[in-house]
Image: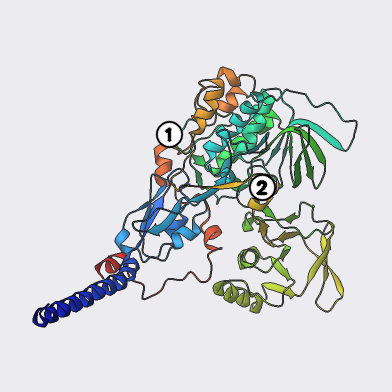
Amino acid sequence: MDPVIIGPLIALGFIGILVLVRVILAASKKEPTESKTKVLVHAINDERCTGCEACVLVCPTAVLELKSNKSKVIRFDDCIQCEQCAVVCPTTALVMFREGSEPPPVLVPDLDDYYQSKVPGLYLLGEAAGKPLVKNAVNLGRAAVEHSLRSGMRPGALAPQGRPDLTCVDVVIVGSGPAGLSAAMSCQQRKLSYVVLEKDAFVASTIARYPKGKYVMAEPYDVRCVGLLPVYDSPKDKLILDWNRILTQVGLDIRLREVVEKIERQPNGTFAVGTDKGKYLAQKVMLCIGTRGKPRRLNVPGEDQAMVQPLLDDPDLYSGKTLLVVGGGDSAVEAALSLATPALRNKVIISYRGKAFNRVKAKNRQAIDQAIHEKRILVLFGSNVKNFGSSNVTMKLVEGRERVIPIQGAFVLIGGDPPIKWLEDMGIGYVQKPHGFVRPPTDMLVERLIGRQPANDKPNLPVSDELSGFFDHAAFASLADEGGGKKARKEATIMVPKDEFLLHLPEKLRVDPEAQKVSQLRHH
């Protein structure tokens, strides 16, 4: 071929190759740039959202608001991508994910439609089962009992074993929250023997510890309360008072301050339940626990006394007393600070086996240092509790000597063991589900088993025939919702104390003062 023609062809081919290489290189460089500009967006599962308002409170740019007691994204362009809202969400209702991708899956217990685990006869109910809100818990308590009866449970099938140390019942109920109380009342109605084992010193402790005057909302509003325990919009103090009045009339077998340590399914299908106070044998076990986990214990003599508490409920209940707080984390330090408020005139002692408060937030460290300087708090570093007496505590101090200190109350705040491992040890596994995963409405589960039921969420209704003889008519009719209804919903703020969530916010999560808003990220 003529060299005059070949030369230009080769040159053109070479130029084409160079252009192609440059296009490929440009595309490879552009891809990560585009991925960097992709922003994080919110996904909120309304069913799991409890309206606690933790995400709203922690957001530094007011992106979120509570609408109809559910978290909603209102000002997305103000989002600075800090993800703090997702971190503090206690039910994983709110997550953040890259725009254009799928929301991350959630880890939920592996349960059937009636909340029975893969271990036949072992049920998990309420918030720990991924179904929060009081009304849901009450419905599930009844549904589990009815499902147990339709799965072969027979009243009184377990004969006495001839062992005085062993209590035989049809159902062991772990936890005295709304689900546990509802299950117990359903057992009583169905003539089933049962026992309620509660690790705390009083029933429905999670709700009872809400701040004074806090409204408990009868959510979800599109679900009917068909359990035997009434649920309606009400200040928590009034709701707890009404529940206690009902429980007094019904006379439930509730054993307080008894911690479940072991649950084992026997070869014959029954369950052996061991606690720190006794042993039980049951046909079915219903775990009506929350997500707080089991408070850690010191395991020293005298720890079971009423004056030794695993949580601080209301500092105002203690005035002019000598009090001991055990622990060195934020919860212990904050409890000590609240008890050491000058107006309460308490003498507060902190016992911590460490050498310094290395695990607490900076603001708490500053506050405790100030309280120590003002002699409102005495800190015993390197100390350990040997035992509790009826009105004193024996401490082993850092130099090895022991000292008996008179006290009127003690709080052991050394953390808790999350329930996930405890549940897994009993055979309750966890599976991943899409973030939008929801289970059937809880009222439907009950009515699928026993037919249409009268709603038990309107306090002014008379007692239904089903509950006749179960409650005192006049007492039940007097459960008036003072200030409830629509007005209550408008006034409702957070259902869980703000500090309960912000207390656990990691130190590393701090807002970058130079962080850009979403609108700026998209512009770039």
Q: Is residue 201 left or right of residue 227?
A: right
Q: Is residue 235 above or below residue 58?
A: above
Residues packed near mark 2 inside 10 Å, few (<14), some (14 to 19) or many (20 plus):
some
Where's the N terminus, which quadrant? bottom left
Asked where in the image residue 174 lies, by quadrant, the reply is: top right
Q: Position of residue 72 (x, y in %)?
A: 37, 51
Residue marked by disc 2: 423
Q: Position of residue 357 (x, y in %)?
A: 65, 74
Task: Say how many tags the image has.
Answer: 2
> Secondary structure beneath disc 2?
helix
The amino acid marked with disc number 2 is: Leu
Report if the CB atoms under discs 1 and 2 are less than 8 Å apart: no
Pointer 1 or 2: first along the chain: 1
Asked where in the image residue 356 lies, by quadrant, the reply is: bottom right
Q: Position of residue 522 (x, y in %)?
A: 27, 66
Q: Residue at x 82, y 64 (%)?
A: 393
Residue marked by disc 1: 222
Q: CA distance from mark 1 to mark 2?
A: 30 Å
Q: Position of residue 249 (x, y in %)?
A: 67, 29
